[in-house]
Image (spheres, helix red, strand yellow):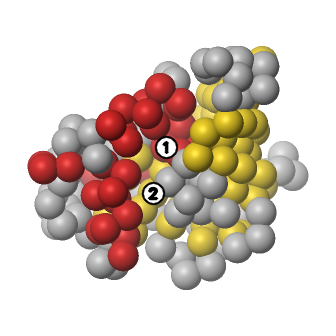
Amino acid sequence: IDPLFEEPDIGVRFVSSAADFGNPDVIILPGTKNTIDDLHWLKEQGLDTAIERSFKKGAHVFGICGGYQMLGKTLLDPDAIEGSGSVEGGLSLLDIETTFVPFKKTVQVTGRLASGDEVSGYEIHLGRSIRLHNTRSFIQLHDGREDGAISYDGRVIGTYLHGIFQNRL
């Protein structure tokens, strides 16, 4: 998210408790090394409720990698890759489901947004997310795959592309 600090009309702040959340216009959930543990922490801090409240007031939500996974309905860990092999409920802001797999995907990618803009970044993750009913693809990758999900109202976006904000559109 470093490029956001360079934008004169954007104020960026990091929060670690619901009391510090305020009324953001956009919420960014960054990547994480352990999605399930960090999702538990987020819920313990009451940030899930703060995110939901802000979303209902009109905030947009953007998740990157683990943040993208957290935005979904369900996180499945059948092989205990990130924990005890449990099924976790996500924030349910995107109609996706993530299953953790035992191999890490690491790849440089390029693609095109629905707007036609070209983007590039890199993937580094253990999960495989599938879009369910009420989402569409965020990026059509040049290798033929689709990445991420965007809600039909456009207010919630998730992607596996680290470095997405490095793309100056």
Q: Is residue 108 visible?
A: no
Identify the residue at horizontal 42%, vertical 62% (top origin): 61
Q: From the top left corner, tell me how far across and down residue 2 is, in percent.
A: 30, 41
Give whichever of 104, 89 is nearer the camera. Answer: 89
The three-letter amino acid code for the residue at tag 2 is: Phe
**Is residue 10 visible to the viewer in this orientation of the structure?**
yes
Residue 132's x, y, as percent?
A: 77, 63
Please, which residue is most extreme toward the right here? 144
Under tag 2, what secondary structure? strand
Q: Residue at x 71, y 18 (%)?
A: 80
| Category of crowding for the residue at label 2, using alpha-carbon neighbours closer than 10 angstroms: few (below 14), some (14–19), many (at least 20) | some
Placement of the N terminus among the 4 image quadrants: top left
Q: Is residue 108 above or below residue 26?
A: above
Residue drawn where x is 62% and y is 79% of the image:
152
- x, y (%) of residue 16? 21, 38
Q: Callout 1 environment at 10 Å: few (<14), some (14 to 19), or many (20+)? A: many
Q: Which residue is mark 2?
A: 62
SS for dot 1: helix
Q: Report which quarter residue 15 is drawn in.
A: top left
Q: Residue 67's mark?
A: 1
The numbered mark, 2 or 1, whose residue comes first in the sequence reads 2
Q: Are marks 2 and 1 in contact (CB under 8 Å)?
A: yes
Q: Residue at x 28, y 58 (%)?
A: 50
Residue 54 located left or right of residue 11: right
**Amino acid at circle 1:** Gly
> Residue 167's x, y, as percent?
47, 52
